[in-house]
Image: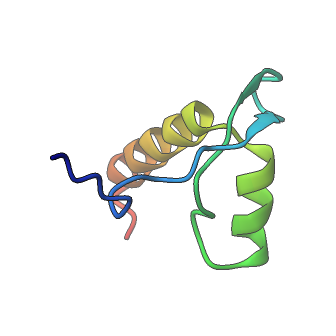
Amino acid sequence: MTFRSNMNTLPPMASLHCVRCKEEKEGLIAPPMPTAMGEKIKTSICEPCWKEWMTMSTKVINEYRLQ
């Protein structure tokens, strides 16, 4: 007997046309922040572009020693 739990499964990501890379890719699962800007990012930026932005923003914060 196998037990399957739906607790650990995520909803499928919606496909969208990314405004940054101009390609049709999967979007974010949830808004990155609980604001209107977070919703806008979720509906217009793909997952790979958002990850790239997060990596670059970390580099900028570290380079300029921002907090």
Out of 65 and 47, give the one closest to the viewer. Answer: 47
Q: Which residue lies furthest to the front in this view?
A: 1
Q: In x, y percent, where is residue 64? A: 40, 53
Q: In x, y percent, where is residue 1? A: 15, 46
Q: In x, y percent, where is residue 22? A: 83, 23
Is 26 above or below relative to 28? above
Q: Quadrant of residue 21?
A: top right
Q: Which residue lies furthest to the left in this view?
A: 1
Q: Is residue 59 left or right of residue 11?
A: left
Q: Residue furthest bottom?
A: 35
Q: Which residue is drawn at 63% across and 44% down?
A: 13
Q: Is residue 61 left or right of residue 42?
A: left
Out of 51 and 42, give the one closest to the viewer. Answer: 42
Q: How is the image coloured?
A: rainbow
Q: In x, y percent, where is residue 47? A: 58, 38
Q: Residue at x 63, y 78 (%)?
A: 34
Is 55 above or below relative to 23? below
**Quadrant assignment for the C terminus:** bottom left
Out of 60 and 10, give the one closest to the viewer. Answer: 10
